[in-house]
Image: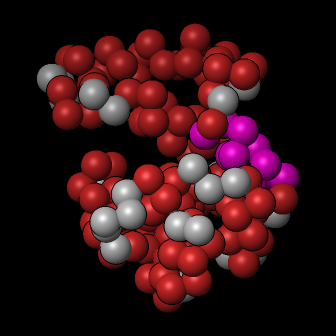
């Protein structure tokens, strides 16, 4: 994964606050340490998982940990969801050196579906692909 300094740099370039970036960095890499996220999972996570089971959405069930993070952040605000997708995509770019940024975005859309926040990330990452690749793959 890229260092948090890289995540912070690109979050700042997107106009996200350090408060949002720090919160999302910590949640993404250490979800078990977030008392707020743990409380969300204990109170609302069970119902979310049961809904997925009832509709037999097994594709989404396989993504439960990340899905719960996105649902949790959606309640905090769109900027948190944008920061989460940015963190996720930067990590993916680092971990998959054979893929282009466009490939990473396409696979992220395939995994999570499209949403307004992911569209923002898609445009931003593709517009800054060369510099992002340099930062994430050195």
Q: Quadrant of residue 35?
A: top right
Q: Position of residue 92 (x, y in %)?
A: 44, 55
Q: Position of residue 98 (x, y in %)?
A: 31, 66
Q: Residue placed at 66% from the left, 30% from the top?
A: 30
Placement of 34 over or under 108, stated as above or below: above
For the residue pair 69 and 86, the one nearer the viewer reads as: 86
User: What main secondary structure does the magenta stretch of the protein show?
Assistant: helix
Judge whether residue 34 can be spotted in this image.
Answer: yes
Judge whether residue 120 can be spotted in this image.
Answer: no
Residue lying farthest to the front in this orientation: 138
For the residue pair 86 and 120, the one nearer the viewer reads as: 86
Q: Residue placed at 24% from the left, 55% from the top?
A: 110
Residue 109 located left or right of residue 36: left
Q: Position of residue 18 (x, y in %)?
A: 84, 59
Q: Residue placed at 72% from the left, 38% from the top?
A: 26
Q: Which residues are magenta?
A: 19-28
Residue 100 located left or right of residue 81: left
Number of marks present in the image shown: 0
Query: Quarter holding the C terminus?
Result: bottom right
Within the magenta stretch, is there residue 120? no
Q: Position of residue 41 (x, y in %)?
A: 56, 18
């Amino acid at each position: 994964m890229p260092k948090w300094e890289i995540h912070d740099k690109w979050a700042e370039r997107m106009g996200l606050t350090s408060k949002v970036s720090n919160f999302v960095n910590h949640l993404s890499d250490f979800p078990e340490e977030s008392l707020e996220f743990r409380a969300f999972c204990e109170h609302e996570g069970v119902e979310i998982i049961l809904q997925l089971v009832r509709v037999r959405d097994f594709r989404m069930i396989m993504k439960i940990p990340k899905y719960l993070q996105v649902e949790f952040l959606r309640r905090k605000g769109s900027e948190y969801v944008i920061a989460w997708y940015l963190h996720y995509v930067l990590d993916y770019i680092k971990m998959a050196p054979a893929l282009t940024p466009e490939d990473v975005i396409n696979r992220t859309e395939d995994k999570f579906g499209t949403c307004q926040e992911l569209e923002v990330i898609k445009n931003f990452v593709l517009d800054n692909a060369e510099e992002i690749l340099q930062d994430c793959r050195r």
